[in-house]
Image: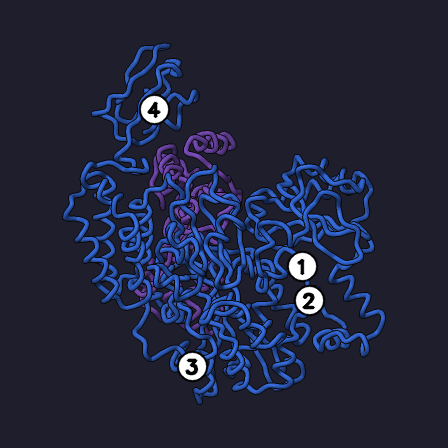
Chain colours: A purple, B blue
């Protein structure tokens, strides 16, 4: 077993130990905790949860892939969430998203090769007064146009 | 966290001056901020405020107070609703009315506070002021009830939002908090509570509009000793943020409403199923629950009675279909959030097979006031079948983007042109989309229709949870319908065929039309397929998902026809039907566009105007984004 695998498994065991006698209805909270700590749901983590809850791995993937929240690959250093709510849509979020995809050369749900950026489309951030809006690691960028995107991305690139 | 118990008892018994102590009354006045001893600076730090830079403003305010050695309290409040003027900062000086400042970004803090602390009205930075008897008003500033945005509103659910400190149980108590619960626990039976809710005419605010009292009665009538209460705070409708604002701004109102409901049906566990995307709301809720438990307003043997209620937060993992109650319950059980056929209704067999009552945040938040003021008072506002108020999230092409609460029966015209301040940029109103992806649109002829559950359904839309998106003449209705279908296709759980396959076909056809590849036969096909999906889907998601298509087809048939016959988009929104050209007068020949064009469609010499080859252009917009001289025209 490689070191990363060992540390993932150890981390998952630690989370599971906080849920003694966990039953099926604890599955989603456990997965959420793992993602919170490890950034994504790895195969090793899912297998470990399956053992603890006595559930087939296929069932866990069935649940995890159903919800938008769960990721199965690591995030980039900067995680970009693009709001695609209706208020943002009518103010041009589709063009903003296109521009981001073009600038980063990735599709939503992917991470750039250098591991710097990952892109995610979210249904609604609930900040409709700022539309169209994107959220980069908790920092909101409001009232965007597609033209502002190259500048914003470069700013983060410079920080490295 | 622990409040003096005698004070608390006195407050929830109605704070009668005859029975109270002088010291308690002073405390009440202080908590209600009818007057203050030292200056108080309020700042809206809801998600929307933070997004607009409230955190930076807050830091600047701290620096300013420190630098000028001003002794003042800073209170972080929720959202008062006028999102477009964020960050919102209020100041209350001793002896003076509370002044509301607008768009106080960090660079305006010094100017704003300097004027206020000098006792002068800061020009151009004020929104309104609170009206309080005996306090000196500010010159040249409107009172809140005269302000066009706040004046026509009736704020019951949002009464405290943006006004009180959401992290203070005492402030909620000072504004009649938990009095409804106290009255219910000490004088009423569960059955009587259900009956009063029925009399009030309260209907589910999550969209369906099912009578709340009737729902509670079903759950009450179940004999099982273990029952559950669930609050649906999984606000998945894109463009709606009512529930978030209530929880961030006044969490105890929700908790009190839930406690009353739990007592009525006989539940001892309350679950709040909330979106994980709302971290601030979750934090405020956790704090409020802990504080209520510490003061015996939740938890074991509430207020010394035999009624106990344990409140548990469950974080949703992001699925629109979980707004459907059976799907929500499956998700709570750790399953995929797929709906099941009703009956059995959750009231008979819900969470873990036990009787369960599910309502949404706004419904519960309406409950305390019904017991405080009586069902007749509640039903005195509204239309024949829709009572009380409704909170709407007003967004899109409107001047006053924000959260509003209006009496049922108000007209669209009042909402758009009075409260909303008209269409952005003086453009022409085209349509108002209500009910999100499940709703439809209202058009000019509906401007004077009173808004209630029945009238909205009759117009082919629905109340929904309260999203109101205003569209102007520049919006393409075919593309709006396509947008909603894109959302539904993404969010369909895939369990039943009409929804899983039908919506996909609908979306493909709309996409084809927007790309200029549609034919006239596509239009009757869209209509027919929409009706089939509506009639045959399993749950509310599929039964309502074709509504945006049907309603835009009804009111904007011409636009559909233009897309498929002349292959034009009358609003100039559909990308594939657009043309990019370069304005030779503005082009400096910097070559930036040509270097960035992914298909080499742009040609030209250095320092000479460039040209786009229309046969190669894929209309990606890269040139438009990159051009530093605004030389690219889009038609």
| Marked residue chain, label 2 | B
Pick the residue in front: A66 or A144: A144
Cα–Cα span, label 4 and label 3: 61 Å
Query: Is residue B70 shown to the viewer in this render?
Result: yes
Sequence-wise, the earlier of marks 2 and 4 is 2
Residue highlighted by disc 4: B596
Q: Mark 4 or 1, which is nearer the eye?
A: 1
Residue highlighted by disc 3: B355
Sequence-wise, the earlier of marks 4 and 1 is 1
Q: Few, some or many C-alpha atoms within 10 Å of disc 1 (few <14, some 14-19, many ≥20)?
A: many
Residue highlighted by disc 1: B164
> Do labels 2 and 4 touch, CB within 8 Å?
no
**Same chain for the residues at labels 2 and 4, yes or no?**
yes
Q: Secondary structure at mark 3?
A: loop
Residue highlighted by disc 2: B175
- Tell me: B521 left or right of B217: left
């Amino acid at each position: 077993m490689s070191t990363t695998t060992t540390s993932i498994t150890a981390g998952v065991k630690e989370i599971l130990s906080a849920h003694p006698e966990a039953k099926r209805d604890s599955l989603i909270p456990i997965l959420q905790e793992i993602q919170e700590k490890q950034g994504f749901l790895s195969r090793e983590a899912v297998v470990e949860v399956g053992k603890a809850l006595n559930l087939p791995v296929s069932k866990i993937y069935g649940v995890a892939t159903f919800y938008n929240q769960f990721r199965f690959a690591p995030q980039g250093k900067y995680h970009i969430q693009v709001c695609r709510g209706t208020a943002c849509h009518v103010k041009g979020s589709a063009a903003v998203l296109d521009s981001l995809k073009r600038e980063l050369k990735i599709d939503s749900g992917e991470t750039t090769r250098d591991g710097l950026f990952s892109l995610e489309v979210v249904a609604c951030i609930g900040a409709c007064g700022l539309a169209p809006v994107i959220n980069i690691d908790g920092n909101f960028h409001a009232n965007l146009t597609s033209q502002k995107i190259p500048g914003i991305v470069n700013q983060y690139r410079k920080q490295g | 966290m622990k409040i003096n118990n005698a004070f608390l008892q006195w407050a929830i018994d109605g704070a009668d001056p005859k029975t109270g102590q002088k010291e308690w009354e002073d405390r009440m006045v202080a908590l209600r901020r009818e007057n203050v001893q030292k200056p108080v600076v309020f700042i809206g730090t809801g998600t929307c405020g933070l997004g607009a830079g409230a955190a930076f403003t807050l830091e600047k305010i701290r620096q300013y107070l420190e630098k000028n050695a001003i002794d003042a309290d800073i209170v972080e409040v929720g959202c008062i609703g006028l999102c477009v003027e964020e960050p919102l900062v209020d100041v209350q000086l001793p002896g003076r009315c509370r002044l509301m400042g607008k768009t106080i970004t960090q660079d305006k803090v010094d100017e704003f506070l300097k004027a206020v602390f000098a006792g002068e009205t800061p020009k151009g930075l004020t929104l309104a002021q609170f009206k309080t008897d005996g306090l000196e008003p500010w010159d040249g500033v409107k009172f809140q009830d005269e302000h066009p945005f706040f004046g026509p509103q009736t704020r019951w659910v949002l009464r405290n939002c943006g006004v009180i400190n959401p992290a203070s149980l005492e402030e909620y108590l000072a504004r009649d908090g938990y009095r409804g619960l106290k009255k219910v626990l000490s004088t009423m039976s569960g059955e009587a509570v259900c009956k009063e809710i029925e009399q009030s005419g309260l209907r589910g605010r999550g969209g369906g509009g099912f009578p709340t009292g009737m729902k509670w009665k079903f759950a009450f009538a179940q004999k099982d000793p273990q029952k559950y209460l669930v609050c649906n705070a999984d606000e998945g409708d894109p463009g709606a943020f009512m529930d978030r604002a209530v929880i961030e701004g006044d969490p105890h109102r929700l908790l009190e409403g839930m406690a009353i409901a739990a007592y009525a049906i006989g539940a001892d566990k309350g679950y709040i199923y909330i979106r994980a995307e709302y971290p601030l709301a979750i934090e405020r809720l956790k704090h409020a629950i802990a504080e209520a438990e510490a003061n015996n307003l939740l938890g074991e043997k509430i207020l010394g009675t035999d009624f106990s209620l344990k409140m548990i937060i469950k974080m949703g993992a992001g699925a629109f279909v979980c707004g459907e109650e059976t799907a929500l319950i499956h998700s709570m059980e750790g399953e995929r959030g797929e709906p099941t056929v009703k009956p059995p209704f959750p009231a008979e067999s819900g969470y873990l097979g036990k009787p369960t009552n599910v309502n949404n945040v706004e419904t519960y938040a309406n409950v305390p006031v019904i017991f405080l003021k009586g069902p007749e008072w509640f039903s005195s506002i509204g239309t024949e079948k829709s009572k009380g108020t409704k909170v709407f999230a007003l967004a899109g092409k409107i001047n006053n983007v924000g959260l509003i609460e209006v009496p049922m029966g108000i007209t669209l015209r009042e909402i758009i042109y009075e409260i909303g301040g008209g269409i952005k940029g003086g453009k022409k109103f085209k349509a108002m989309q209500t009910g999100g992806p499940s709703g439809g649109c209202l058009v000019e002829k509906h401007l004077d229709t009173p808004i209630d559950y029945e009238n909205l359904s009759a117009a082919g839309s629905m109340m929904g949870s309260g999203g109101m998106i205003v569209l102007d003449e520049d919006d393409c209705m075919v593309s709006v319908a396509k947008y909603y279908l894109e959302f539904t296709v993404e969010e369909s759980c895939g369990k039943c065929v009409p929804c899983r396959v039908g919506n996909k076909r609908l979306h493909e056809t709309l996409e084809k039309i927007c790309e200029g590849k549609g034919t006239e036969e596509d239009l009757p096909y869209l209509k027919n397929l929409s009706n089939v999906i509506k009639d045959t889907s399993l749950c509310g998601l599929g039964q309502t998902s074709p509504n945006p298509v049907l309603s835009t087809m009804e009111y904007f048939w011409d636009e559909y026809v233009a897309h498929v016959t002349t292959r034009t988009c009358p609003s100039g929104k559909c990308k594939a039907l657009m043309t990019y050209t370069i304005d030779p007068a503005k082009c400096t020949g910097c070559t930036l566009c040509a270097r960035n064009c992914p298909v080499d469609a742009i040609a030209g010499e250095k320092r000479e105007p460039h040209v786009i080859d229309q046969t190669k252009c894929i209309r990606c917009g890269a040139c438009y984004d990159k051009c530093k001289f605004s030389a690219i025209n889009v038609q």
